[in-house]
Each structure stands twice: as C-alpha cells, then as structure tokens.
Image (tube, helix red, strand yellow):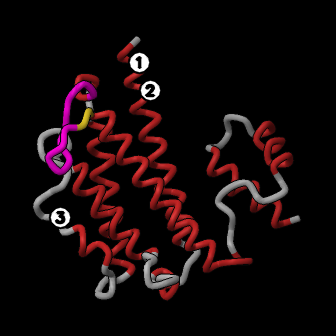
Amino acid sequence: MTEQIIENYKTDTLEAFRNYKKLAERAIEQVSDDEFFTAIDAEANSIAVIVKHIGGNLRSRWTDFLTADGEKADRFRDSEFVAESDTRESLDALWETGWNVLFGTLESLEIADFGKTVKIRGEDFSVVKAINRSITHTAYHVGQITFLAKHFRSSDWKTLSVPRGQSGEFNAYLAENKGKTHYLEATREFTKEKSKE
C-alpha cells in the first residue's frame, strides 16, 4: 500500500509539473519580445527574468538531487534577476535545461529514494518536502508569468482556463468528452470551438 501511495505521489507530481510548464509556455507564446523583457514597474520582474530564475532554480535543485546540496556552487542566483544581455532564445534554452533536469531526476527516483534526506543550502529536507517546496515555488512563478502575459495581452488574451461566464457550458463539454482529452487541452479546444460560433 505504501509503495502504491509513493508511486501515485510521484505520478501526480510529474503531472503537476508538466501542467505548470505547459501553462507558462502557453502564456509566454502570447507575448511579443518587447513584452517578454518588460517589467511593469521598478520592483517587478519581467517574464524573461522569471523564466531565467525558474530555469536556474530547477537546474540547481534537481541536478544530483539525492547526493549534492540543491544550491549548487555554480549557481549565481542574483544573476537570474538580470536579463539585459539575454535573448529570448538563450532564456528558452535555460528554461528547457532546468525542466529537463527536473523531469529526468524525478522520473528516475525509486520508491526507496522517497525516504531519504536531501540538503538545500545546508538544511535537511525529506525528499517529499523538497519536492513539495520545488513545486510550490514553481507554481508561484508560473502564476506571475500568467498574470504578466494576461496584462500585456489584455482583451486579446487567449484564456488558459475556463472562459468567464462559461463554466456550465465547459462542464457539459467535459462530460461529453470525458476521458478523451487532458483538462488543459480541453480548455483550449473548448475555447477554440466557442470562438468559431
């Protein structure tokens, strides 16, 4: 029973991370290069900076996850909050690197690994606590990306969720298409169908 619970947790965590990545990328694809690099005020981070930070954080935390401190010596966190010399392409590569390390490591974890302890900045974390910490941190920043992209797109925003005022119709759509598509795909397909009407 315990093994099944761990397998379910691992499967659910992988799915959640994949969903957050997909949400962020669907938001990012809606913004121009100028918007990608624009901070909305002096204290705000641009989408570019958030992408850089997530990529750097995931690479650091998930490289040698079980054997090395999650804050790697070659990570310069402060530099993740400066994107003036970066390009959209270079940041996309960093983003993909971070996610690839995450997925490769998480997929490779065995049942016994979930009972181990890892370190982040010298502090001990259970593997489960470290995973939960990573997913909540990532979700926090994906929310920021989505907010900024929606701000820039304004009335041209293509929703990533159920369109306003259409919950009942969407629920009916889901019932009709049960098991045929993933929730995120269903919202996209539903929105496309509604836009054709």
Residue drawn at (23%, 28%) of the image: 113
Q: Is residue 26 left or right of residue 65?
A: right
Place of residue 70 in the rendered image (x, y in percent of width and height, measured from the top left): 20, 50
Q: Quadrant of residue 119?
A: top left
* CA gap, disc 1 and disc 2: 6 Å
Where does label 3 land, which residue?
Answer: 75
Going by the numbered disc 2, the residue's amino acid type is Asn
Labelled disc at residue 8: 2
Q: Nearer the viewer, residue 10 or 57?
A: 57
Q: Is residue 33 magenta?
A: no
Place of residue 63 in the rendered image (x, y in percent of width and height, measured from the top left): 20, 50
Where does label 1 land, which residue?
Answer: 4
Going by the numbered disc 1, the residue's amino acid type is Gln
Q: Are marks 1 and 2 in contact (CB under 8 Å)?
A: yes
Going by the numbered disc 3, the residue's amino acid type is Arg
Task: Report crowding for label 3: few under 14, some 14 to 19, many 20 or more residues within 10 A (C-alpha).
Answer: some
Place of residue 141 in the rendered image (x, y in percent of width and height, measured from the top left): 45, 61
* CA gap, disc 3 and disc 1: 35 Å
Query: Of tags 3 and 2, which is closer to the observer?
Result: 3
- The secondary element bearing badge 1 is classed as helix
The single residue placed furthest to the right in the displayed view is 197
Give the position of the N terminus as an image quadrant.
Answer: top left
